[in-house]
Amino acid sequence: MQAKPGTTGQCGCGRSPTGKCCGWHALTEEEYKIEKDEYELAQYRSQAEELWFSGGSCTGGKPE
C-alpha cells in the first residue's frame, strides 16, 4: 500500500480505529477481528475506569 503525498502515517486500508496506521493491514481477517475486539474492550475499560474514578455516574446522575 502506498501513501498519498502529505498523508504519511495515515491509514489507507480502513482497518485502523484511529485513522493512523497501526499495521493492521498486514493481519489476516481472523487476526484483525481479535485485535479489533481487544482494542474495543480496552477502550470500554478505559471509559468505565474514567467514569469510576472521576466520580461520574453510569446511571446518568440518578440518586442511588
Image (cartoon, rainbow, N blue to C red):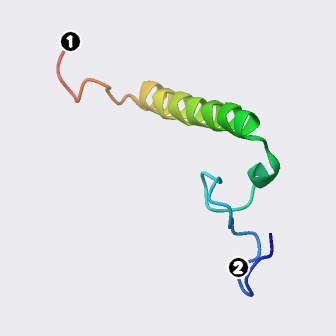
Query: Could you say which disc has been placed on residue 45 in the image?
Result: none
63 lies above or below 2:
above
The part of the image, by quadrant, that contains residue 56 is: top left
Spatial CA distance of label 2 from label 1 is: 49 Å
Residue at image x 76%, y 54%?
Answer: 25
Question: Is residue 34 shown left or right of residue 52?
Answer: right
Q: Position of residue 61 (x, y in %)?
A: 21, 28
Which x, y percent locates residue 4? 73, 83
Q: Quadrant of residue 8?
A: bottom right
Residue 63 falls in image quadrant: top left
Position of 63 with respect to 9 (left or right) is left
Q: Is residue 11 left or right of residue 64?
A: right
Residue placed furthest toward the top = 64
> Are the residues flagged by discs 2 and 1 in contact, CB closer than 8 Å?
no
Image position, residue 10 (x, y; %):
69, 69
Q: Residue at x 75, y 69 (%)?
A: 9
Q: SS at mark 1?
A: loop
What residue is at 57 percent from the left and 29 percent from the top? 41
Q: Residues within 10 Å of mark 1 (few under 14, many from 20)?
A: few
The residue beneath circle 2 is: 7
Question: Which element is circle 2 on?
Answer: loop
Q: Please, which residue is most extreme toward the bottom here?
A: 5
Q: Nearer the viewer, residue 29 or 53?
A: 29
2 or 1: mark nearer the eye: 2
- For the residue pair 47 and 32, the one nearer the viewer reads as 32
| Quadrant of the rendering where the N terminus is positioned | bottom right
Q: Residue at x 44, y 24 (%)?
A: 52
> Which sits earlier in the primary sequence, circle 2 or circle 1?
2
Measured from the top left, where is residue 28 in percent x and y? Answer: 78, 41
> Label 1, on which residue?
64
Quick one: which residue is furthest to the left in this view?
Answer: 63
Amino acid type assigned to the residue bearing label 1 in the image: Glu
